Image (cartoon, helix red, strand yellow):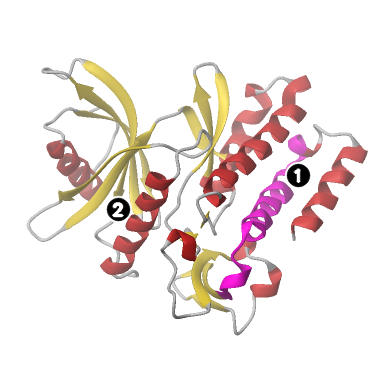
């Protein structure tokens, strides 16, 4: 075990490793998210674990005090259902799903997904890696490629009548596959499906969403649509008409991502003034 992990996080990994007959090696601990712990692991195959593959393990948290276990279980189920329903190059791939016992009093769910070398979310990438990882003349094309790949991933979702509903810089990864950078959408715990997808209630004409306040379309940032989460001021609950849950709803979040990228001087500096003006007009149209 090469990563430094202690306390409950180590206990959780040890329980996960037991599920895999001790054939997981902990490479890195990415930390605790709002609903899950995330680990970079090396999984062994073969009679002696001699064949190795890199995976990301997401273990849903059993120790939250501000969220009932039933809500965590629902988020887990929604995320797994989405990843099983959509196989797309620009959406993280799911490899294994299961339940594990943490101790005599607690159990939880986990899944393994693909590992991308040097992966980080868009916020981290453009703040810390973009300047050195992408040559100057290629920066403009790189930014546009990231946006195109996000759109392609969303297209794969929407063709299955599924909507992400919480797309943001922190929910999009950039990493390497071989020598090439690639963009992957992740974190589908708050995704929703239309009636054709079978996961939205039939009786009600509205849909209840959990999402991030700063990315939410402004027309929904008020009563009677929105209620805030006292434990997390950035997270809100929104009840919107089902007719509003369309591709355009997710595209608004893409506009939010683009707007935040253009607020970064290094990204904005990759474009000519007339190109920046065009991109900002696109953001307005997305809203």
Label 1 to label 2: alpha-carbon separation: 34 Å
- The crowding category of the residue bearing disc 2, from other C-alpha atoms within 10 Å (few below 14, some 14 to 19, many at least 20), is many
| Image point (25%, 61%), residue name | 63
Determine the secondary structure under disc 2: strand
x and y, in percent, of residue 281 in the image: 85, 52
Is 247 magenta? The answer is yes
* Residue interval drawn in magenta: 240-267
On screen, residue 207 above or below 269: below
**Residue occupying the point 57% across, 20% down:** 180
The foreground one among 210 and 67 is 210
Say which residue appears at 67% left-offset and 23% top-offset: 134
Taking the view exactly as shown, the residue that stands out farthest to the left is 104
Tag shown at residue 60: 2
Residue at image coords 74%, 22%: 138
Looking at the rendered structure, the secondary structure element under dot 1 is: helix
Quarter the N terminus occupies: top left
What is the crowding at mark 1: few (fewer than 14 residues within 10 Å), some, or many (at least 20)?
A: some
Where, quadrant-wise, is the C terminus in this rendering? Answer: bottom right
Q: Main secondary structure of the magenta part?
A: helix
Q: Residue 14's x, y, as percent?
A: 16, 40
Judged left or right of residue 89, residue 143 is right
Q: Position of residue 69 (x, y in %)?
A: 26, 66
Q: Considering only order in the chain, which callout, 2 or 1, is on the residue closer to the N terminus?
A: 2
User: Residue 203 has which mark?
Assistant: none
Q: Nearer the viewer, residue 232 or 286?
A: 286
Picture quarter containing residue 4?
top left
Q: Which residue lies under the disc numbered 1?
A: 262
């Amino acid at each position: 075990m090469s990563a430094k992990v202690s306390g409950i996080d180590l206990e959780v990994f040890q329980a996960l490793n037991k599920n895999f007959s001790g054939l997981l090696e902990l490479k890195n601990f990415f930390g605790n998210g709002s609903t899950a712990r995330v680990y970079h692991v090396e999984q062994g195959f073969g009679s002696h674990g001699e064949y190795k593959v890199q995976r990301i393990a997401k273990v849903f948290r059993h120790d939250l005090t501000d969220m009932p276990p039933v809500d965590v279980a629902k988020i887990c189920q929604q995320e797994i259902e989405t990843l099983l329903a959509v196989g797309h190059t620009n959406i993280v791939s799911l490899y294994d799903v299961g339940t594990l016992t943490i101790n005599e009093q607690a159990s939880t769910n986990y899944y393994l997904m693909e590992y991308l070398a040097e992966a980080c979310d868009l916020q981290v990438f453009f703040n810390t890696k973009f300047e050195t990882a992408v040559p100057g003349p290629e920066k403009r094309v790189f930014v546009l490629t990231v946006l195109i790949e996000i759109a392609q991933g969303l297209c794969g979702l929407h063709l299955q009548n599924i909507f992400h509903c919480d797309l943001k810089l922190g929910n999009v990864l950039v990493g390497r596959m071989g020598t090439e950078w690639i963009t992957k959408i992740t974190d589908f715990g708050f995704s929703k499906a239309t009636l054709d997808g079978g996961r939205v209630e039939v009786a009600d004409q509205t849909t209840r969403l959990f999402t991030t306040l700063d990315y939410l379309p402004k027309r929904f940032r008020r009563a009677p649509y929105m209620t805030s989460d006292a434990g997390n001021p950035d997270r809100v609950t929104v009840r919107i008409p089902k007719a509003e849950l369309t591709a355009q709803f997710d595209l608004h979040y893409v506009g939010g991502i683009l707007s935040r990228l253009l607020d970064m001087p290094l990204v904005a500096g990759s474009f000519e003034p007339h190109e920046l003006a065009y991109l900002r007009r696109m953001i307005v149209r997305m809203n």
